[in-house]
């Protein structure tokens, strides 16, 4: 039977029982493979806009039932009608189909890449490094400071200057880590390093560690922090390193007298820091479990020390008096100097508490850390102890590991005597001449 253009000839029963090629009209037909290979399929024959004769496959013919065959021919005719509309618009249905599939493939690939990039942004890699390498070995406070230095303060807590200095770095944090170029990292770090050199230096060092870890995880191929080190230093300029502003040690007895008269936990913590010549974080985080009253020792654990080594502070009379007073004021507290808002003593004082205490006493130009310098200068100028003993009391780093271990064990009595002298000096007394440990004589 000859088909006529535009006339649909096949019934559902004829579609179900088709055993050979048969036309439905309008270019649509059923093609039945010869032999037993394959199943019947719908084919639409047409002349493309460029003059080529082409065949568009429209899927398999469903022959399981009359109803299924009827639905199959309906869908095939609908697809053929759509192809005719495209031809009227001079669109080749086959080429159009290819283009649609390629576009879908590109979109799928782009979505996959976007998802992958989201998993491997610099921010996410920094957080993972922080979780895996920083949190397990650092204190909770240092861990928070580590990641905060990279991500910066919350957006609503930033000053206009901070928003400007961190604008480029913020943009990099949400970029895929393997797409960050050295020049981009350089441009992002320069404003931060110029505004706050200490923070900028830490951010640079910490990002270098993050990139190294990402290389090992095969998330990026190079560390863009490495080639910019010299150029970053050149652009930022020479950094003038100065000492922390310290009080003249001769003024300390009078200052201590005023400090003792001041009320509050912050004042006692500041006095404790001075009489023990300790660092701010060590004094603030002092816990009762670190105190041995019988041996008159304060053992600061390694994880709270700058050099990650346990440090023993030998306690003078005033230090013991401070402890007795704090125990009476805060029985059962975890910290020796708990925060005011911490009713159960489970939280320490903040850094600002000590600085504010200095301001209230009219010493706002002096830094808290500067009291360690005052202690060192006092010891040197009064010949209270040899430099090795003073350095050991301050927990400064000795490069030679064997010598460092020897110094910790060899200067116990000298350090006890040194801290007793320091305590006596701060109380306004004279240092007994018999307790002075002079510098070793220099060879002629």
Image (tube, rainbow, N blue to C red):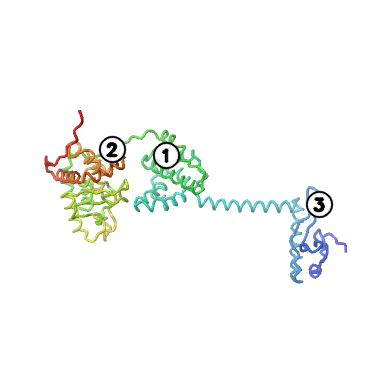
Coordinates of residue 54 in the picture (x, y in percent): 79, 53
**Of the numbered discs in the image, which one, if any, rests on residue 53?**
3
Q: Which mark is residue 191?
A: 1
Q: In front here: 48 or 173? A: 173
Residue 67 versus residue 276 in the image, above or below:
below
**Front disc: 2 or 3:** 2
Nearer to us in this view, 164 or 53: 53
Q: Earlier in the sequence, mark 2 or mark 3?
A: 3
Q: Are marks 3 and 1 in contact (CB under 8 Å)?
A: no
* Residue annotated with mark 2: 243
Residue 261, how many percent across, how many down?
16, 49
Residue 124 horizontal side relative to residue 251, left or right: right
Q: Quadrant of the C terminus?
A: top left
Between marks 3 and 1, how big is the CA–CA gap?
66 Å
> What residue lies at 85% left-to-right and 62% top-to-bottom?
3
Q: Earlier in the sequence, mark 2 or mark 1?
A: 1
Callout 2 secondary element: loop
Residue 99 vs 365, above or below: the answer is below
Give the CA distance from mark 2 to mark 3.
Answer: 87 Å
């Amino acid at each position: 039977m000859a088909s006529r253009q535009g006339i649909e000839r096949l019934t559902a029963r004829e579609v179900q029982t088709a055993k050979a090629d048969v036309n439905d009209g309008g270019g649509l037909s059923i093609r039945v493979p010869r032999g037993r290979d394959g199943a019947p399929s719908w084919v639409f024959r047409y002349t493309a806009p460029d003059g080529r004769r082409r065949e568009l496959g429209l899927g398999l013919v469903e022959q399981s039932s009359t109803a299924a065959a009827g639905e199959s021919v309906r869908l095939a005719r609908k697809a053929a009608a759509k192809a005719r509309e495209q031809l009227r618009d001079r669109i080749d249905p086959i080429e159009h189909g290819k283009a649609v599939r390629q576009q879908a493939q590109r979109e799928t690939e782009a979505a996959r890449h976007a998802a992958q990039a989201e998993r491997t942004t610099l921010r996410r890699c920094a957080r993972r490094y922080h979780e895996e390498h920083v949190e397990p070995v650092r204190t909770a406070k240092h861990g928070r400071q580590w990641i905060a230095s990279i991500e910066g303060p919350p957006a609503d807590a930033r000053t206009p200057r901070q928003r400007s200095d961190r604008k480029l770095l913020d943009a990099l944090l949400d970029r895929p880590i393997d797409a960050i170029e050295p020049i981009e990292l350089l441009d992002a770090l320069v404003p931060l390093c110029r505004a706050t050199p200490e923070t900028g230096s830490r951010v640079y060092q910490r990002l270098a560690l993050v990139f190294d870890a990402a290389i090992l995880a095969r998330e990026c191929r190079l560390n863009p922090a490495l080639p910019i080190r010299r150029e970053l230093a050149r652009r930022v300029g020479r950094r003038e390193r100065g000492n922390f502003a310290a009080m003249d040690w001769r003024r300390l007895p009078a200052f201590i007298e005023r400090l003792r008269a001041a009320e509050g936990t912050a004042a006692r913590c500041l006095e404790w820091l001075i009489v023990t010549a300790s660092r701010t974080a060590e004094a603030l985080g002092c816990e009762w479990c670190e105190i041995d009253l019988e041996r008159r020792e304060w053992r600061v654990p390694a994880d709270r020390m700058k050099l990650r080594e346990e440090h023993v502070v030998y306690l003078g009379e005033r230090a013991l008096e401070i402890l007795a007073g704090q125990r009476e004021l805060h029985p059962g507290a975890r910290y020796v100097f708990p925060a005011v808002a911490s009713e159960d003593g489970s939280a320490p004082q903040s850094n600002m508490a000590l600085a504010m205490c200095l301001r209230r006493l009219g010493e706002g130009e002096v830094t808290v850390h500067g009291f360690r310098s005052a202690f060192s200068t006092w010891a040197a100028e009064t010949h209270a102890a040899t430099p090795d003993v003073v350095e050991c009391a301050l927990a400064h780093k000795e490069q030679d590991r064997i010598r460092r271990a020897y110094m910790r064990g060899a200067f116990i009595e000298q350090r006890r005597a040194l801290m007793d002298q320091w305590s006596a000096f701060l109380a306004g007394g004279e240092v007994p001449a018999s307790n002075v440990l002079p510098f070793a004589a220099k060879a002629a």
